[in-house]
Every structure is written in C-alpha cells, then in structure tokens.
Image (spheres, rainbow, N blue to C red):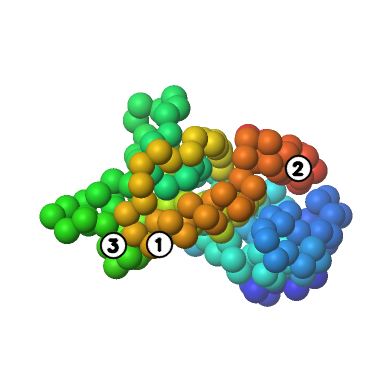
Amino acid sequence: MSTRRAMIPRSVQAKVVETYGGTCWLKFPGCTGRADTLDHLMPYSKGGTDSVNNLRPACRHCNSLRADRLVQGRGIEVHVLLCAPRVRPHGGMPPTATWLDYGAMLGMMASGRGVDDDVWRIAEGMWNGAVAKALRLPSAVPLVLLPPASVAVERWREWLRLGYDLQVDSTHPAKPFRCDLELRADVSWMRSGVTDRSVSNAVRARDDDWRRCGLVF
C-alpha cells in the first residue's frame, strides 16, 4: 500500500487495510476499485491526522479527483437540489443555509442582456468556482447547491459518494428555453436517468459502503 505522503507509518497503512479492506471507499465514476492509496476523511490540509480513524483506502483516480473536498458530517453539511433547467425546486432547507443558486447567478448575469450561450457559460463558471471553494471551507453553516442541469448530470455521483444529501425534482420545465446551451442541458438531463429511484438506489449502496468503512451520517 503506497500513499502520496510517505511519512504515514507502514503499521498504520496495514491497520487501515486490515480494518476497512482493500477496495476504494469513494467509488467515483472511473474508479479502478483497487485501493493503492490512503485518503484522509478530514483532509490533511484542514487539520486531518494520519490516524487509522481518519484514513480510508482509495484508488489513485478517486483520491486525486476528490482532492480536499470535505465529506458530509466532517466539517460540512451539504444539500444538493437536482432539477432540469428553468425549474425552481421547493423543499425544506435549514433556515440558516447558504444558497449557491445557479439560476440566481444566471439571472444576475443576464440582467439587461438576456440569456445567451455566452452568459450561460459565464454563470456556469461562476457557479463552479463558488462551489469548488465552498466545499473546502469547514463551516457550521449548511450549504444548499442548486447546480445547472449540465453540471448536475456530470457530478451528482461524486456528490453522493461524499455523503451529500441529494434531492431530485422531476418537474419538467414549462417555460421555453432561452439559448442553445440551456436546451442541451435539458436534453442531457432527460437522457441521464436521474430520478428519485436511481438516486435512492445509489444512496442505499453508498450507505452500505459507509457502514463497511466505519462511517455514519
């Protein structure tokens, strides 16, 4: 078992494998399955230690892809609302939550100009940048993510495997689409198979893996 941080004692590495097995705990899309690294539950850069309790087996692909994003219940609380373009999901969220709402960012960018492909790209970049920062900031304030449908289709499995709470709104948009990229995002959403059932099945599989790895929500 090798790691990026060679200073982790071999005895600790061996104990992690003995305790949690030799398969990757993250299982992101593209996972190789073979745990040839150790992943810090609480990232080392955020104060995480090299203890058995804070380490889990992971493949290099998933360990690199996760980077230092925080895991649910370990420095962060995240709720993700998945929906098609032009749909405003409704659900009970913590009243103190910080909302990162792609629709609001798009509306701000479109003020006075309207939504076209360039505005869509800029707002998507803003949203991705804000979320990349937020998922690395230990905070007691819950985060609510409302991603663009194009990003949701690509990333929901990663968010789920990090323990984030995912909710699906299957409402189909009644409003006309405003640009080609918005239409393409809707097509991707419709073809993705992201439904209450598919997400619920994935949640059950994740929970089984988390229990195997000694994690609880």
Residue 12 horizontal side relative to residue 43, left or right: right
- Residue under label 2, please give it: 205
* Relative image position of residue 158 (x, y in whole percent): 60, 54
Label 1 sits on residue: 181
Q: What's the residue at 54%, 36% (across, down)?
A: 170
Closest to the observer: 208 or 55? Answer: 208
- Per the image, label 3 sits on a secondary structure element best described as loop
Badges 2 and 1: C-beta atoms under 8 Å apart? no
Q: Is residue 202 above or below residue 129?
A: above
Residue type, mark 1 in image: Leu
Q: CA distance from mark 3 to mark 1?
A: 8 Å
Position of the N terminus, as image quadrant, is bottom right
As helix, strand or loop, the secondary structure at mark 2 comes to: helix
Marks 2/3 in contact by CB < 8 Å: the verdict is: no
Q: Earlier in the sequence, mark 2 or mark 1?
A: 1
Q: Quadrant of residue 67?
A: bottom right
Category of crowding for the residue at label 1, using alpha-carbon neighbours closer than 10 angstroms: few (below 14), some (14–19), many (at least 20): some
- Mark 2 vs mark 1, foreground winner is 1
